Amino acid sequence: MKIGVLAIQGDFAEHTSMLKRLGVETAEVRLPAHLEGLEGLIMPGGESTTIGKLAVDFGLMEPLREFARSHATWGTCAGAILLSKDARREQPLLGLMDITVQRNAFGRQVDSFEADLDIKALKDVSGSKKPYHAIFIRAPIIESVQGDAKVLTTLKDGRIVAAKQGGMLATSFHPELTQDTRFHEYFLAMVNKK
Ligand code: GLN
């Protein structure tokens, strides 16, 4: 199995190391041709406006849309914003997931935080009942899900921080910055189902 990581800005290296730990072959995606032969794609955290603008410049927007329609695709943080249909402001978006996001919903960099989440889907793949410790860095909130998009988990106050729609996955937080491989394993299970 070969999984691509969008590598134009942000913490793509951390996703690559996590995938390598799980014994998966990886490829950095910077140009449309790099999508060839991949079975899934991760879009990392970073700055969604920068990633979007560079993706436009590199002619990646339409190839990414086409790829995500037929292959498992996961966006973490800025990557989740890119996947969304609506980020409540003008910026290049792939517009594939029926979710509305609010960027920087928890405030500035200093307001970054960690929280334990209860994620049933992860328990199903790993068999472990441990809560999932999630890291939020200038994170977006998924304000609402529409259409076929489903809520995967929320904070204790009910705010949505992960959603899934068919083969697409969006998380507000950063599983690649932890030692816990369960979220990546969950994504690999999605890739195998496609
Ligand atoms: N605040 C960033 C944005 O709006 C996302 C932050 C992140 O990916 N950690 O794009």
Image (cartoon, rainbow, N blue to C red):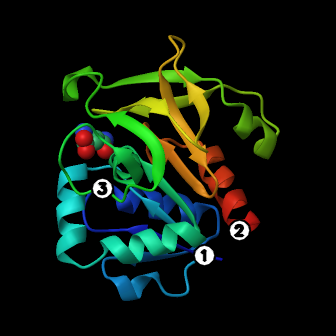
Q: Amino acid at mark 3?
A: Leu
Q: Amino acid at mark 2?
A: Lys
SS at circle 2: loop
| Label disc, if present, on residue 93 of the rendered structure | 3
Q: Residue sitting at 67 percent across and 50 percent down?
A: 186
Q: Nearer the viewer, residue 20 or 59?
A: 59
In the picture, measured across the screen, residue 106 lies left or right of residue 109, that is right
Q: Amino acid at mark 1?
A: Glu
For the residues labelled 1 and 2, say whether their Cβ atoms are less than 8 Å apart. Answer: yes
Quarter of the C terminus within the rendering: bottom right
Q: Which is in the foreground here, disc 2 or disc 3?
A: 3
Image coords of residue 155 (percent x, y): 52, 19
Q: Is residue 190 above or below residue 57?
A: above
- Picture quadrant where residue 6 is located: bottom left
Q: Which residue is mark 1?
A: 39
| Label disc, if present, on residue 19 of the rendered structure | none
Q: Residues within 10 Å of mark 2 (few under 14, many from 20)?
A: few
Asked if disc 2 is less than 8 Å from ligand 1, the answer is no
SS at circle 1: loop
Q: Is residue 51 above or below residue 46?
A: below
Quarter of the N terminus within the rendering: bottom right
Q: CA distance from mark 2 to mark 3?
A: 24 Å
Image coords of residue 26 (percent x, y): 51, 74
Q: Which residue is mark 2?
A: 194
Q: Residues within 10 Å of mark 3 (few under 14, many from 20)?
A: many
- Ligand 1, by image quadrant, is top left
